[in-house]
């Protein structure tokens, strides 16, 4: 029996070391990205605390972890494979949030796959703490901002402070306050939820009571932020915006959080813990380890399957990086005009897209025998990486300082025996009277075309998995004096667009 227990611990130790080595070395870029986020981000500075507290809690459970029985849930194999596929697509599309989210998912699904129910009960709650340090909470900030504005409107009414609320702006006679993302309270919410979960793991050991404390922490953290924001507004109201709190309220916010949130939460935790049934002081009997070597063989088989799945994405992305090419547009000119249209000619144009760090940023004009002209603009990336990518927050179809958006709708452009997806956008000049431009534009990624950013990201990921990193924005345009006049050239624009699509495909 003792020999079998020793063998079990040895197998578990080998398993843990190999999994940790794989997740650390194979996914080092994701860990580096997380560490940089925790160091630089205003909302995730607690990430290092979460990381090291999680490591410490796992260390305190080391004997339990090494004694886990090899009774895995093979039903979690699809979840492990889905995580690997999601990471691979996220790397190809350069979606860092999904890529970093895969780290704790790999650890959780690997443990449950190999150890089953025991891991789920004893280890999974601790590993789940890592989710509080991941950049997956940004989408709740806008909702929290609006809730903060609403509650402060109630506070201002209760204190008879006149205020005008417009969207996220709160205007009082002394000045205007903007409830920015940092005022949403998401930092306080994450820290409070993390602390309540750690307390539950250490002391409550009961899912119902842990959930009760968790919901207490959510309410009091939000209340603390509401009071914090109201305190800043009230200070500005009383001091005619001269109080230092109006511009510098970092320390003040954490003091309010400690008093309004942490103190009530720890009091509630103490009361909840007192109400918990007294645990049996007798030591639990240790279930016997597997009695045959077949269990160890199955464990090593499961470990090999796990490591193989975890290594798919790092190996694939490394091979793609090593074999990346410069794309299909190297040394290729813009397409020649067809029929009565001659060109392309180089000419300075009033409208052009603005795509940062494009490898090819070219425009050409096509002219017919009647002197009418069409424009082609190309913004192409031979290869993409962070800050140099087709779908980027700072890439724009037009300059909002120069143009007003009149309309934008999806269209299908005939090409050969079928059609491809594009968009028709109509702009009006701010500086020139009765000056419009109608634009047919789409993203071209290899054989794929897309008329939305989401589709472009997805198709870009699929194309990159095949070793192609090349893609760009293609746009044909016509200037005119009215929207009706623009529509007269629809046939010519469609013909040029089909020619361009075929040329760059």
Image (spheres, rainbow, N blue to C red):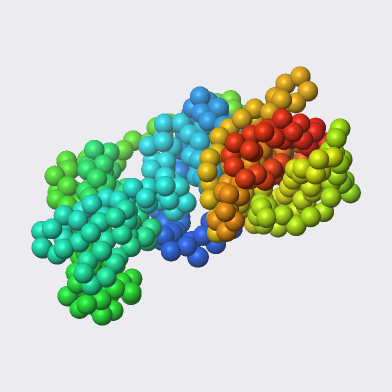
Q: Is residue 454 above or below residue 62?
A: above
Does residue 173 appear anywhere in the picture? yes
Q: Is residue 423 above or below residue 196?
A: above
Does residue 3 appear anywhere in the picture? no
Q: Residue furthest right?
A: 331
Residue sitting nearer the eye, 103 or 375: 375
- Residue 185 in the image: x percent, y percent? 32, 57
Q: Is residue 267 above or below residue 449?
A: below
Q: Taking 321 as reference, is 148 left or right?
A: left
- Residue 81 in the image: x percent, y percent? 59, 31
- Quarter of the figure with residue 56: bottom left
- Quarter of the figure with residue 342: top right
Residue sitting nearer the eye, 180 or 504: 504
Residue sitting nearer the eye, 347 or 199: 347
- Residue 77 in the image: x percent, y percent? 55, 28
Q: What residue sits 65% from the left and 44% below the top?
A: 480
Q: What residue sits 14% from the left and 64% below the top?
A: 161
- Residue 86 in the image: x percent, y percent? 58, 37
């Amino acid at each position: 029996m003792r020999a079998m227990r020793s063998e079990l611990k040895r197998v578990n130790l080998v398993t843990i070391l190999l999994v940790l080595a794989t997740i650390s070395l194979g996914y080092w870029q994701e860990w580096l990205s997380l560490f940089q986020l925790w160091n630089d981000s205003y909302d995730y500075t607690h990430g290092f605390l979460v990381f090291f507290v999680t490591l410490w809690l796992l260390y305190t459970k080391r004997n339990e972890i090494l004694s886990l029985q090899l009774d895995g849930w093979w039903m979690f194999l699809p979840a492990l494979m889905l995580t690997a596929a999601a990471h691979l697509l996220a790397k190809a599309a350069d979606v860092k949030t999904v890529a970093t989210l895969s780290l704790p998912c790999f650890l959780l699904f690997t443990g449950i796959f190999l150890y089953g129910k025991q891991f789920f009960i004893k280890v999974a709650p601790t590993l789940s703490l890592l989710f509080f340090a991941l950049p997956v909470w940004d989408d709740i900030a806008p909702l929290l901002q609006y809730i903060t504005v609403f509650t402060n409107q109630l506070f201002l009414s209760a204190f008879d402070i006149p205020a005008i609320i417009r969207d996220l702006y709160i205007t009082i006679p002394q000045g205007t306050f903007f409830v920015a993302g940092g005022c949403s309270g998401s930092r306080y919410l994450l820290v409070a939820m993390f602390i309540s979960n750690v307390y539950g793991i250490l002391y409550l050991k009961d899912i119902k009571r842990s959930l009760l404390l968790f919901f207490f922490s959510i309410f009091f953290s939000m209340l603390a932020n509401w009071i914090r924001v109201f305190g800043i507004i009230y200070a500005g109201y009383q001091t005619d915006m001269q109080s230092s709190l109006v511009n510098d309220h970092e320390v003040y916010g954490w003091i309010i959080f400690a008093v309004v949130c942490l103190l009530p939460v720890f009091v509630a935790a103490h009361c909840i813990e007192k109400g918990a049934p007294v645990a049996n002081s007798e030591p639990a009997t240790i279930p016997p380890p597997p009695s045959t070597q077949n269990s160890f063989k199955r464990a090593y088989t499961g470990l090999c399957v796990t490591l193989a799945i975890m290594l798919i994405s790092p190996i694939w992305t490394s091979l793609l990086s090593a074999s990346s090419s410069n794309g299909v547009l190297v040394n290729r000119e813009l397409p020649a005009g067809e029929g009565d249209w001659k060109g392309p000619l180089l000419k300075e144009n009033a409208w052009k897209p603005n795509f940062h760090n494009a490898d090819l940023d070219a425009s050409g004009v096509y002219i017919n025998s009647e002197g009418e002209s069409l424009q082609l603009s190309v913004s192409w990336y031979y290869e993409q990486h962070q800050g140099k990518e087709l779908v980027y927050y700072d890439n724009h179809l037009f300059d909002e300082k120069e143009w007003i958006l009149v309309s934008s709708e999806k269209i299908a452009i005939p090409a050969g025996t079928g059609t491809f997806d594009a968009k028709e956008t109509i702009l009006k000049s701010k500086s020139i009277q009765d000056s419009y431009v109608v634009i047919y534009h789409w993203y071209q990624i290899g054989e794929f075309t897309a008329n939305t950013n989401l589709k472009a990201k997805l198709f870009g990921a699929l194309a990159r998995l095949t070793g192609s990193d090349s893609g760009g924005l293609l746009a044909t345009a016509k200037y005119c004096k009215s929207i009706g006049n623009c529509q007269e050239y629809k046939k010519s624009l469609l013909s040029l667009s089909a020619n361009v699509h075929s040329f760059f495909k």
